[in-house]
Image (spheres, grey):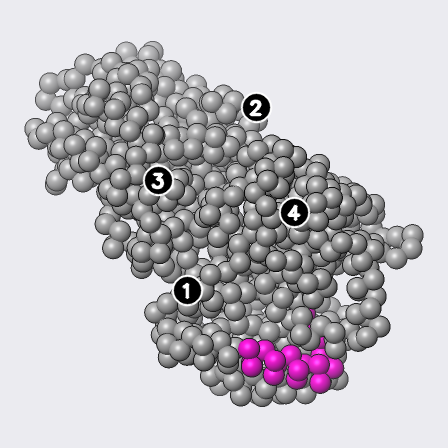
Amino acid sequence: MEAALVDALAAVLPAERVSTDRHTLWLHAQDFWPRLVMARRRGEDLPLPAAVVSPASRDEVVAVLRWCHQQGVAVVPYGAGTGVCGGAAAVAGAITLDLKRMNAVTDVDEVSGTVTVQPGIIGQALEDHLADRGWTLGHYPSSNHCSTIGGFLAVRSAGQASSFYGKLEDMVVGLEVVLADGTVVRSRPVPSSAAGPDLARLFLGGEGTTGVITEATLRIWPRPATARYRGVLVNDVVAGLDAARALLRTGLRPTVFRLYDETDTAMVFGAQGLEVPPGCLIVVGVEGDADVVEFTSRHFLQLLTARGARDLGPDPGEHWRAHRYDISYRFAEYMRPGGAFGDAVMLDTMEVAALWSRLAEAYDQIRAALSVHADLVLAHVSHIYPEGASIYFTFGAAGQGDEEAVAARYDAAWDAGQTAALRTGATITHHHGVGRLRVPWLAEELGPGGLDVLQRVKRALDPIGILNPGTLGLTEERR
Amino acid sequence: MIEPLDAVADEAIHGSYCPKMCNFSCPVLTATGDERAAPWALHTVVAGLATGDRTADAAAYNDLYGCTGCHACRAACLYDLDVPAEVRAARAVAIAAGADPPAVAAAARHVRAGRSPYGDAPAALPVSRADADVAVIAGCRDEPATLQAIDQLLAAAGVAASWVRPSGCCGATPADLGDAATAGACGEQLAAHLRDAPPTVVATDPHCLPALRAVAGERTVRDVSSELADHAHRLRLRGLGAVTYHDPCVLARDEGVIQAPRTLLAAAGADVIEPPGAGRATACSGAGLALELVAPDAAGAVARRRTAQLSDDRPVVTACARARRLLAAAGLAVRDLFVVLADHVDAERGR
């Protein structure tokens, strides 16, 4: 983008909303896609945006997008820049639209049980706001301390308590979006509607390619009065998957269900100072009114032990609660130069989902595929549904200082893992989204018809392709 | 008080690879929405200076603006990373390399003229008492009414005070600005003031505590509320109703002084209301790390957010002059803890 255009943009809204200083541009060059983190670590210069615009209101977003649409300038929506798939990474010459200034809680409707927020609020900040009033959103992803609600919505995020509260997309009661040409679209905040297709779904998972979310009304719940967490041990992953399915078929819902494969059990809990016997750990958490928690916990424990699970008592569950966000805090310990496993480490996660009937095969095949390229592969299951579940793989390799070699292993691991997921009937992503990372496998995921529909939607909503080019592979990056 | 850059470099490099996990805790990021204020962003600047990837210049100094020193990020951090210490060190490096930020020059000029770094004229001190039990160091942002109230309360508690006012400043604010020369000169003056001081030194402004400890030798250094709370039974306080107490970050989170102000308020009969963000989890007023000098708009934005949390029908009190000034400027009816307590000394019971 020409300097004159930046000047023209600054005339569209208050001048202090537009930044072109090098540091601000550099900060917005990246999100936390590990491939970009590795690139930064080896000193690679990442593409910079031409300007960073920080709107303070929906109307300012309208003004910016209208101007960009008229000028043909690309726009990358940006929340906290903590996505792990490159969806918020800068496009050279584009503007990055940083939405963190729009972080207000505009309404808490305690009669209906809804909260209305702007997109830039950090997840934990919203949770704290609700907690002060006796409510919870029920959305606790491991990135809750750092990421924004807008970012969560854009990638169809799932939290640790999704087995009870659902994914964030399931909590959406109403949505306000600004389209590429500045048109404002609002879905009416109602509990449900049959007034044609659900238009909000055009934007949830759109990762900013179909519109910019400027407000969301979300379902909230009274904060649970009681919580009870417990650990049991099963022999293998298949036994754990069977147990998860059986739990859900009782008609009761755990708040949290986590099944760790044997490696994950040993690595994660051992590293955190809790010795767990060999096997696969299951953490089950139930929250709510005391009598409901008492009944549900007892019933689950009976069911699990009747299936051969060994009761480990409350310690593993409480330990998990106390350390529920630690793994995200530990990212730097491994990825920084001179980290815990030396220089040039690669570390990432791959979350897929499949039907129960395919899940064990998906686990085996994806794990095997990743293991060809990674030194370490861990997996856990933490989002369960009546018809299937998500498997969350963590994989890493120590590059012994060779950044290029470890990057090649990283790319190969992703190719192998995603290909295996598709081959076993799984989805390539459960809640991290596509970004730039997963573009190579999206076409096969959607199939020719599905991809064509997505492209038509994109062309209808963003005819000149200014919104987040490159993400979802929908438009070529403008350079 | 200003650590060398080498001492904080490893922390900064670590933090620059953290996926911004303490974002939720940062009052400046929350109030401004400015990515430069994310603790991660501050780590990247400090790391860049430490590794030579960034030049130590005025731009680097400006990019370090967004911190109040409240340590909310440190409380959240699994690795205990100290962002304010990094910022002080990096600011000092930028200044040493020739950056000459106007706020730093102005603060140094004020201090040389015997004013506070903020330009406040020195407040009149209470009369020192002979055979003092404690030396009381007057904060440069405390108003005369606060100093008189503290003197009155100490007297009521049976504590004889000798009053000391550093010339201009104790050195804490220059250190926050990264101005090592001014901070050092202030420290030398302060040390001279304390040469014959009694074994206990009391600071009226909690921000002064680290500077005092740096020069106080074997003496005990503590805040006023802790000193007074030890003698609360002698204070003869009464008649205070419901009040909301704002915990200053430095006092509650850094010093761990949470109960003492509440003990004093309770001694006066107050029903202490805990606002959102209380005790160690207190929310920042914007008053620390000289944010008010380097980025007054950001400090004001932080104060407005805290004011929104504290605003109700009850009076609000706090034990930090800097916090009180900023919150008041943001529109909050907030009073100094010691002035409020002094207003509720029961003269009848004292006779």
Q: What chain does mark 3 sit on?
A: B
Q: Between residue B198 and residue B327, name the one nearer to us.
A: B327
Displayed quadrant of residue A250:
bottom right
Query: In the image, B332: left or right of B339?
Result: right
- Residue A9 falls left or right of residue B182: right
**In this orientation, does residue A180 appear?**
yes
**Which residue: 67% across, 59% down?**
A469
- On the same chain: label 4 and label 3? no
Q: Position of residue A378 (x, y in %)?
A: 53, 79
Q: Which residue is mark 1?
A: A43
Q: Which residue is mark 2?
A: B313
Observer-side mark, 1 or 4, equals 1
Placement of the N terminus of chain B among the 4 image quadrants: top left
Residue A281 image offset from top left, x and y in percent: 55, 78
Question: Residue at point 49% right, 85% down?
Answer: A278
| Mark 2 chain | B
